Image (tube, coloured by chain):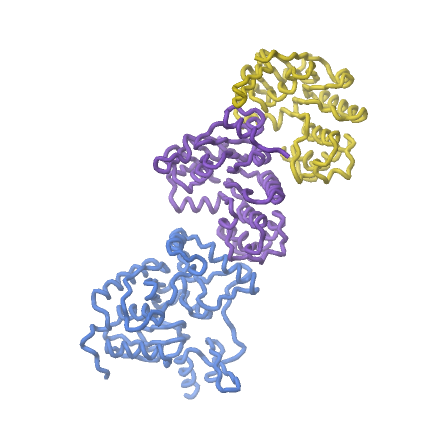
Amino acid sequence: MTAALMLELRDLSKSFELHHQHGARLNVLRGLDLRLHAGECVVLSGPSGAGKSTLLRVIYANYRPSFGVVHVRHDDRWIDLAKATPHEVLDVRRRTLAYVSQFLRVIPRVPALDIVAEPLLQTGVDGPQARDRAGDLLRRLNVPERLWALPPSTFSGGEQQRVNIARGLIVRRPILLLDEPTASLDAENRDVVAQLLAEARAAGSAVLGIFHDEDMRDRVATRLFPMQALEAA
Amino acid sequence: MSALLQVRELSRHYGLRVGCEDVSFELHPGELLCIVGESGSGKSTLLNTVAAQLSPSSGSVRYRQRSGHWLELGALSEADRRRLAREEWGFVTQNPRDGLRLNVSAGANVAERLMALGMRNYSQLRHIARGWLERVEIDPSRIDDAPTSFSGGMQQRLQIARTLVTQPRLVFMDEPTAGLDVSVQARILDLLRRLVNELGLAAVMVTHDLAVARLLAARTIVMQGGRVVETGLTDQILDDPQHPYTQLLVSSVLTT
Amino acid sequence: MTTTHFAYNFAFLDEDTKRMLRRALLKAVAIPGYQVPFGSREMPLPYGWGTGGIQVTAALLGPDDVLKVIDQGADDTTNAVNIRRFFSRIAGVATTEHTADATLIQTRHRIPETSLREDQILVFQVPEPEPLRTLEPREAETRTLHALADYGLMHVKLYEDIAQYGHIATSYDYPVLVDGRFLTSPSPIPKFDNPKLDRSPALMLFGAGREKRLYAIPPYTQVQSLAFEDHPFEIQHWEHQCELCGSGESYLDEVVVDDRGTRMFVCSDTDFCSGRRLEAQA
């Protein structure tokens, strides 16, 4: 049985035009094709500067592609995120496409538990239940309970990263984009993340990730997608 | 059509001077849209024209009422405008003193819009007022104090309570945290973030502060010289700005 | 028989002015509770002494009318005496102190205790016709509020009263809603008198000379005093009865009778009180 195709990139290109740097142009991606199926974990590999993070951001519509198609399977329809309205993109992000960035964006005053619970609250789950699930996830990721009521701005890099991961994974979504989710984690917590990804895949999610650590890569990847830096124009 | 507000090619001039020109956008329930720009960008003119406080020079603003019927705001009678402002909309002004009644108590300020909608039970009004004071982190025991005895941040939180108590479908906010100390601002932004989420509000907010847009708005419009130079997802605009002016704005922000 | 001054028109005002007033009064009767602007004239009384009431009375008086004038319920106080003598001289009309015998009653700040009839008219002297004035100083704004029936502001005031005093503290000039539409000031009558406004058989006319407004409550019109569900409108009660006539149902004045501060409570409505005393003697 062939697994369902969840994400398709065709001829994807991304350049940055820096108007205030004398119109300098940075070409990062060109003519990229990629297919991602349910249950897969495709790992983007290649040296830094190859455009791996950029690619994830383009898929998430955080960056606007210069050319090409970003087809996402959303509710049994296909949407091209390169051409979708902001409204449509927000809907896709809410229910289909999750993104765990490399660094936690810290919001002042909001406790870690609420940061993790928020995506779940937005799907309509009530407060106490959402916070319970958030607590479960944080516990699995070894974030001590005494930290849950604190805003993460004072946490260590590793603790912030685990809050970030919990927030990204708390709502089961069909496609997961992960940018170096284990970079600041010790062996035990890398294990937990690998477990969480395995569970997600078993439930039918497709994962596209960047893992710097070779060990992690070997454990979680079902396929590698090698990338190379383009020459600057 | 699930949109709440449709703005099409809206322009507002002051004689020969352009206030805002050719602006189009839509707003859906539960969305917060930020209008970002520096002084003179036309953002306040745009907000006031959309909120029917100024009449358009050209273009249209359509609003879908609770009943489901669309209203053309440019052709609104004064009676209808006031009814909408009372029953379905809210407006948070930059200076809370412009949006509060300074000579009546905090409780009366919060209860007023409820009374305007016909609520006539004193205990119930007071109960709701106390609940909202707590919600905006004002000590409920200050319910009978006049707002003149409140700090600027407290006054602004009171204005927010006064505006949101009737759960308006659409809220307009004009730089609600400008001029406040940073810590006070953080508190109010946090409050707005929570309330917008909890109440599922649709809101249009004007700000010159990109960080506020990042925090609160899923979508942003960037204005310069009365025109929209860039529009779309907030995170996309701030992380991958396309227009030279947006790139300038983003790169100019100081970070701690 | 008093002599009339032939240099003046009947009831002082010229006929064109009376016509203007009557037009305004007709409009006021047609829109119960709505303040009609009118061309208030200079009267031989300063503003604040009842010029509005006098103009309304002057416009309505005919030779067969019987006029009663009261001030705070009494026929014998300065204001009442002066106005009654004015019309007696300048119109030659019969005057009376008996409410039941009057066809037209001009009053300052009270409604007679004796029930009124369909053939009677009550004219009120009004200092400030706009019930919202203390809350909203701008005339353009209060006119808009009335036009849009946007009366939330009034309830803010009542709320504030309860919050500050535990009850609605307004004891006179208590705002009413006329015919379910216009918020109206009943003039500074005590709230004790408000129920008398509701569906009265008599025509009630209100004149504010300084502010140049007239308004009316036609006979049998519904008049409700504003209140909250859980703080309903209540009239004043006394533990005393009138010491002169024994009434326990009329509005009582507290009068200081000597230098030691001895007080007694007596009916404010002098005609009502004397009427009861006469009956008791008979």
Instruction: Give the colour in which the image draws chain B.
Output: purple
Q: Is residue B139 visible?
A: yes
Report the side of A130 relative to B21 (left or right): right
The chain coloured blue in the image:
C
Relative side of A155 to C175, left or right? right
The image position of residue A172, as x and y in percent, is 68, 27
In the image: residue A232, left or right of residue B78: right
Percent coordinates x, y for residue B252 in the rendering: 56, 31
Q: In the rendered image, which quarter contains the C terminus of chain C?
A: bottom left
**Picture coordinates of residue B173, whole percent (x, y):** 51, 41
Q: Residue at x 54, y 15 (%)?
A: A67
- Is residue C121 visible in the rendered structure shown here? no
Can you say whether B189 is above or below B106 in the image? above
Q: Position of residue C226 (x, y in %)?
A: 47, 61
Side (left or right) of A112 relative to C174: right
Outermost residue on the front side: it is: A22
Q: Nearer the viewer, residue A77 or B14?
A: B14
Kindly indicate which chain is depicted in yellow in the rendered structure: A
